[in-house]
Image (cartoon, helix red, strand yellow):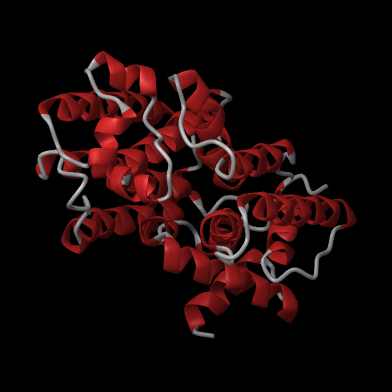
Amino acid sequence: MNRLREKEYKEAGISDPDLIASYEVCRELNAKHGKTYYLATLLLPPGKRPYVHALYGFARYADEIVDDLDSTLSDQEKAVWLKTWGEAFMADVQSGESTDSVCRAVVHTVRRWNIPLDLFDAFLHSMTMDLTVTEYQTFDDLYEYVYGSAAVIGLQMLPILEPTGPKAYECAKDLGVAFQLANFIRDVNEDLDRGRVYLPLDELARFGVTRADLERRELTENIKAALRHQIDRVRRLEGQSRAGIEMLHPSSRDCIDAARILYCGIANKVEEIDFEVFTKRARVSPRTKFWVALPAWRHARKARRKFGPGHVQGINPI
């Protein structure tokens, strides 16, 4: 283990070798599957990073169960596997320990920061929906899914980020949903490969677009207009979320602001490729990530020197 990670665990007060090994599994999941999130996490005080890695690792691992588990299993069998794994996690939180390579660190994080378990229930519910629901008639229908798949991730992180006011919770939900919706816009083609459409059907219909039109994978002016409508919602939610970032501990703000700029920036990239989501993948370039991350890193260092890192070993343990 390099010195940087040793410093992270030391400042977080994590010394048990088995626990560190579990946190490392979660960190590797974050680094592999969430490069933008991983980059943003490095802007946090070192002692807070392992906890965020644990939460993201849990989310990514569950998502992999849904999307990439042994292809010989039916969706029903995957749902049973997910239910069993989720119930074991909940029991582990109550007991305070786990033998699961991912859940051990997550249990430790949940108990150390007193993160509400209903947020994990909602997340697991949405992961199960991915095995049974292939389209959503209205945005309200879709919101049930994105609340559990995205909004709760921000709510889980909030105790670690130390909000100063209750409005931060609503803003965290808005930002999480904006991230997820930007992802849906970018991944229309990939989601069709999995038999799913995450754009509300009634909103597509307003622009003369049906699911069958999407499945033809031929870009039309109507589809462009429908995607513009979705991008407008991402930008509206992003704007609503900004006030909440200012309510976080100063040492945490740059992490979330960088994630906001980079992840919601996917919507800009979709526009730059003229909405050609069927043959291209909208990406935020490494150069853009660098020019966002560098000033954010400098500002985050100044904030830590001026205000300190905040609580880095948890608050209100269960």
Which residue is depicted at the point 21% across and 63% down? 286
Q: Residue at x 51, y 53 (%)?
A: 308
Whether residue 246 is visible, yes or no, is: no
Q: Give the vertical position of 68 relative to 203 (above or below).
A: below
Q: Is residue 200 left or right of residue 110?
A: left
Q: In which quarter of the image is residue 178?
A: top left
Image location (x, y in percent) of residue 94:
87, 51
The part of the image, by quadrant, that contains residue 195 is top left
* Residue in the picture at 69% in, 58% down: 106
Residue farthest to the top, as pictured: 206
Q: Which residue is drawn at 29% across and 17% down?
A: 205
x and y percentages locating residue 244 in the rendered image: 45, 30
In the image shown, does 301 or 72 lie closer to the viewer?
72
Image location of residue 99, percent across then percent down: 80, 70
Q: Where is residue 310 in the image (x, y as percent from the top left)?
A: 57, 50
Locate the N terminus and report the quarter of the image it occupies: bottom right
Describe residue 32's horizontal placement relative to residue 129 as left or right: left
Residue furthest to the bottom in view is 1
> In the figure, 315 relative to 207: above or below?
below
Residue at the right extreme, as displayed: 95
Is residue 131 shown above or below 20? above
